Amino acid sequence: MVYLFLFLKGCDILHRKRNYRRFLLVLLLLNIIGIGVYSYISIRDSIPDDVRIRAEEQDGLASILEQNPLITYDDSLSVAGNKTYTIECRLCHVMPLKKVKVQIVEDTWVAASGTPIGLYMETEGVMIIGSGDVVSTDGIAYQPAEHIVQAGDYILKANGTDITNKNQLISMIHDSNGETMELLVDRNGEEIPLSLTPLLGEDNSYKLGIWVRDNTQGIGTLTYVDAHGNYGALGHGISDVDTGELLKLDRGELYQAEILSVMKGSKGNPGELSGVINYQKSNQLGSIDINSEKGIFGTIPAESRESLHLVPMEVGLKQDVTTGSAKILTTVKGETKEFDIEITEIFWDQADTNKAFSIQVTDPDLLEYSGGIVQGMSGSPVIQNGKIIGAVTHVFVQDATKGYGIFIENMLE
């Protein structure tokens, strides 16, 4: 009986060991599969969706796609006579990775600027930035708009009337006599009807319990102007400071700006340019026609361009950008000049186009004066090998010497 017990116990131990080995084998296989999937996705995401190359520089495609030797594609295609075509990238000639749109472009020149500019923008409709309490005549706080409106909604109509500014909306609320108002709002591109009933506040005026905004202003940096007076600036869009939503532009103007001082950046505080904008007609430079994630765009008439710092430069494409020394063109102490930086990393197909490459300020003069990149420098041209290749877009909050940039070809799209 004892021998039988020991035999069965030994069999049980062997069975457990086999199961344990099987478990380890399955775990190993899952790890291998996971690493393989992660590697595949990483390689795929390193390939840009579209590439622009010059007809005389057919190796421009290779400089981007051959960053990883595992990426292969048909390099026998000729660009002669074709403006656009598509190539398929594969993993080691076998597994499909991504189809890349290739566009043949001519050499492009623009005038790089670095001039500080004043911005004034009115929104399309009135933007709701939040809801709040209304203290009624009975002394109780109510929230008539809670769970009805959302931050980022744009009020387009009230009782069938187009709303163009917040004063118009306030006037209609005051005249409502507490009757329910029918609002039409734009929410993420969808028009939605809402009903809100104004409450009589303790100050004897009617309120809807919403916070709204219909304009914004600020200081930024002009990136470039082309031969036709079309300009690009900031390298990122103008968003609402409370909601973070990209503002929908109704109209906007560009003005001359004077920088009075710089609040130096430090860890946790990126600093900012402090200046004044004179909104007189004589100081208007041009119009703001587009507010997009890639910057603000519009036109500057020829007579207004005479007051700007403009340096003609060839446009550098993505494949012209390399890690290493570069310069930014920006204005400090009333003078627009170049300052030394390093391009530390390039992200060929970053989902956020405003963070296409990272930079670090190395110029001792700029570090001494501003601590690096400060708010208001967004749009400062980035120059490498005599070409404008991008613009400054963001500063690292924890390190004012570092920031991000956008490729200039993305701004010119």
Image (spheres, rainbow, N blue to C red):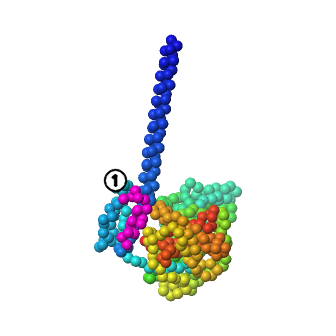
Answer whether residue 326 is visible to the viewer in this image. Answer: yes
Is 78 left, or right, of 51 in this rendering?
A: left
Q: Position of residue 159 (x, y in %)?
A: 51, 65
Q: Secondary structure at mark 1?
A: loop
Residue sitting farthest toward the front: 3
Front in this rendered view, residue 7 or 374: 7
Q: Is residue 256 above or below residue 148?
A: below
Q: Amino acid at mark 1?
A: Val
Q: Is residue 382 above or below residue 130?
A: below
Is 88 left, or right, of 358 in this rendering?
A: left
Q: How many marks?
A: 1
Q: Position of residue 191 (x, y in %)?
A: 46, 61
Front in this rendered view, residue 224 or 91: 91
Q: Which residue is mark 1?
A: 94
Q: Position of residue 314 (x, y in %)?
A: 45, 78
Front in this rendered view, residue 117 or 199: 117
Q: Position of residue 196 (x, y in %)?
A: 55, 59
Residue drawn 57% across the image and 62% down it: 243
Residue drawn 52% across the image and 72% down it: 391
Quarter occupied by residue 90: bottom left
Residue drawn 53% across the image and 69% down it: 324
The C terminus lies in quadrant: bottom left
Front in this rendered view, residue 236 or 94: 94
Answer whether residue 405 is visible to the viewer in this image. Answer: no
Task: Indicate yes or no whether the magenta region holds residue 101.
Answer: no
Question: Counting other residues with Cα less than 10 Å from the Cα at mark 1, is it few (<14), some (14-19), or many (20 or more)?
Answer: few
Residue drawn 49% across the image and 28% down it: 16
Report the magenta residues as a range.
57-72
Q: Is residue 160 above or below residue 28?
A: below
